[in-house]
Image (tube, helix red, strand yellow):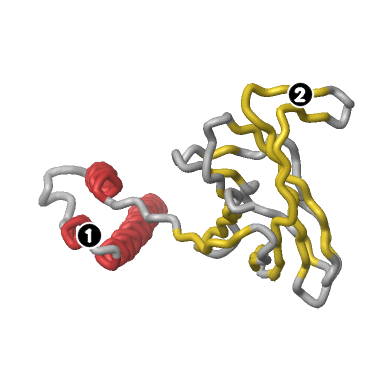
Amino acid sequence: MNNIIQGKTKEIGLKNVFSFIIDGLLLFFLIILGVETIKLGQLVIGFLYFVLSLLIFVPHHFLRVTHSLKIVIIIILFIIVATISGKITPLVEQKYDHFTSKQAFNLTLGGKPFSMEVKEIKYDAQLATESKDTLTTSGSFIVVTVDIINLSPEAAVFKLGANPELIDSQNRHYTLLGEGLTVGKLQPGVAKEVPYTYEVPKDALELKFVVKDSTKIAKSVDLSRY
């Protein structure tokens, strides 16, 4: 008889501990989310997150539901609030540092400093591939050749998280056709010549060569002045 009672007590205890952990994690998550949301200027949404966190302290039997159902209700309400927050959150405008061709600019990748400079731009209606085939286009192929220099005192891997792209005056984005140098070790102070190839329509004007690195500010090179 004693063993049966002890088994039941142990089972109830484990269930309570598990519920306490779930409530604690959910409370911590909602409070942090509320604080960060208020920092972004969404006072009402942040207040709603705090209200949801307070629901965790309300005993589930007061709500006439089980503890599990109370958690499910809080999660559903969280999804609704998060959806509303996402719809009213303004898009963060991308910031740019502007450069011209033959003007070097610095990049930070993986905590390592690099320098890049657009040294040459070629326009052509045909493009020769490595297999010696010739590609044609109704627009233009643009080959942007850059010099990359490792500014750190030791060899460092150069790897762009996103390939450089071209953006025209109509805010159309053109991605890389071939593969430029995305992975590789560069020796300190040695310039590496890398070509980036794009295909654009004939009406693509005021092209910008845009590179994004580990910083929040993208680097934009004005190719129209070349």
Q: Residue at x 70, y 38 (%)?
A: 123
**Residue 158 point in image, percent of width and height:** 75, 59
Can see residue 1? no
Q: Residue at x 77, y 65 (%)?
A: 149
**Residue 201 point in image, percent of width and height:** 57, 29
Q: Position of 206 compared to 108: left or right?
A: left
Q: Which of the 4 image quarters holds residue 100?
A: bottom right
Q: Residue at x 56, y 56 (%)?
A: 220
Q: Which numbered marker is on residue 135?
A: 2
Q: Which residue is mark 1?
A: 42
Q: Nearer the viewer, residue 15 or 213?
A: 213
Q: Nearer the viewer, residue 184 or 177?
A: 177
Tell me the amino acid under the disc marked 1: Gln
**Residue 215 point in image, percent of width and height:** 55, 64
Tell me the amino acid under the disc marked 2: Leu
**Residue 20 point in image, percent of width and height:** 33, 60
